[in-house]
Amino acid sequence: MGVNSSETAAIDIGGIGAGQIGAGPGAPAKNEPFSWSGRTIYRAEAEAPLPLWPLTLMVAFYPLWFLLGLSGFMWVLLAGPMAAAVIRRRNLTAPKGIGLWMVFLLAVMVSGLSVDTVSRMAGYVLRVGYYAGATVFLIYLLNGGRSVSVPKIVRVFTLLWIFTVVGGYVALIIGDFSFRSPMWYLMPGPLLNNDLIKTLVTPGFADVHDIIGVPVARPKAPFPYTNSWGSMMALTTPFALMAMTDNRVEIPRRLVKVMLVASVVPIVISLNRGLWLSLGVGVIYTGIRLGVVSGGRLLPKLLASVVVLVALIAFSPLGDVVASRIDNGHSDGDRFELASAAIGGAMERPLFGWGSPRPNVGNQPSIGTHGQIWLVTFSHGFVGAAGFVGAIVAFLFWTRRQVTTAGLWAHSVLVIALAQMPVYLMIPHSLFAVMAAVAVALRYQAHTVGGQEDHVLN
């Protein structure tokens, strides 16, 4: 699935679009300070170019932050200079659906009144930072212009995907090795009582679990949990596929192909059914859309790729691993109980929730820690849950008009995110990947659909 020279030229070269795109009668003037994407998207001019270095440090240097114990904090810290740069801009574009996201943020803030301990307050403040940082990140990337162009965004997230694949192999080699990072020794003692913060400052490469009858080192590096690794693997794989179909990303296509094949081993060994399911849903959805838009010309290539992948797994020891994992769904009951506990807790405080996860009975994980939908429902009530899910669905809807291969892969990240919500947390890493996909999908779409430069994918 490649692009020809005309397709490359049609994709947004750096800004949101050429001039004012999709404007009709009564559209806002060029100097209006804020506009809704989908109705009016225009190029963010260079009177105050946004700096690229916060994005580069945040994403491309992620393995360094992981080793230093800073990976969970850089998303918030580097959102600061992004916000400072965005504030200086006169012309800003925000995506449709941002109103629902603001409802979610309001619920998060109000729910803080229910936080009752120092440890829970530390986790709550960090989560507020993630949500606020992700909001800034979305606006920053959407208004990036030439300095923070679409190819540069795709490039850094493709690098993060490569780091994720490499981390999977490192985990298979050194197992569950973990260590106290430099940040551990700088962290105030009371904050280490919070499980999330403690995990972030003690990096580990794998968790060894006996799920299929033998101990298996399930990869998590460079992320804090095995589920984080699975979520990010699924969410960043489409960025790699964007890099293959947009030549401006300038990552060798052969390298991406090799890494795609290599990724199969850690994906299977991770025993991560949520990864398998969500990535599969995203690929199937995109395949159908590609088939429709291309008039069926891309279906043979896609089907051939799927057949090769299935054969690679089925006729290797990986097939036995997959079969054993499907036969051993020991965590299903626990997940159902956690979801039920989250809903039950939300019913006690239905509007704005408890502010943060709370201890569960026995040795069960804390309520609201296994699945983003359960986290926001329990912690921030049904108002927060409606705002969060509604915003992601709205972003999915408003990015649907893709006519390029790369744009469809960006759009598919939102499909994957929705499939992951019941089983994975999205903060911090996954939420930032999703916001990047929203910005990239809108920018691809603005220059091909809104700009009247529609063309058939190849």
Image (cartoon, rainbow, N blue to C red):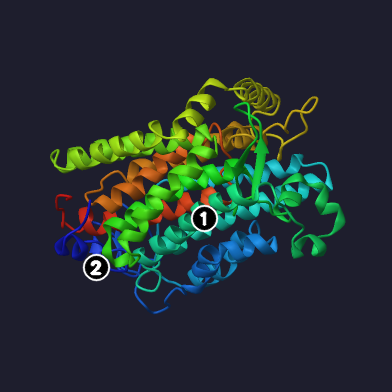
Q: Is residue 81 left or right of residue 156?
A: right
Q: Is residue 338 left or right of residue 329?
A: right
> For residue 19, which numbered disc appears in the image?
2
Residue at (28, 35) in percent of width and height: 307
Residue 424 location (% of width, % of height): 56, 37
Residue at (16, 53) in percent of width and height: 454
Q: Alpha-carbon neighbours of circle 1 within 10 Å: few (<14), some, or many (≥20)?
A: some
Most extreme residue toward the bottom is 47
Q: Which residue is mark 1?
A: 166
Residue 75 location (% of width, % of height): 59, 60
Q: Is residue 418 left or right of residue 410?
A: right
Residue 244 location (% of width, % of height): 30, 57
Judge by depth and name the residue closer to the eye, 47 or 78. 78
Judge by depth and name the residue closer to the eye, 291 or 390. 291
When asked about the image quadrant of residue 43, the answer is bottom left
Residue at (77, 42) in percent of width and height: 115
Judge by depth and name the residue closer to the eye, 263 or 351. 263
Q: Is residue 273 above or below residue 156?
A: above
Residue 283 location (% of width, % of height): 34, 39
Judge whether residue 36 can be spotted in this image. no
Real-space Cα separation, disc 2 to disc 1, in angstroms: 41 Å
Residues tagged 2 and 1 counted as in contact (Cβ below 8 A): no
Give SS at disc 2: loop
Q: Is residue 326 left or right of residue 176?
A: left
Which amino acid is tagged 1?
Val
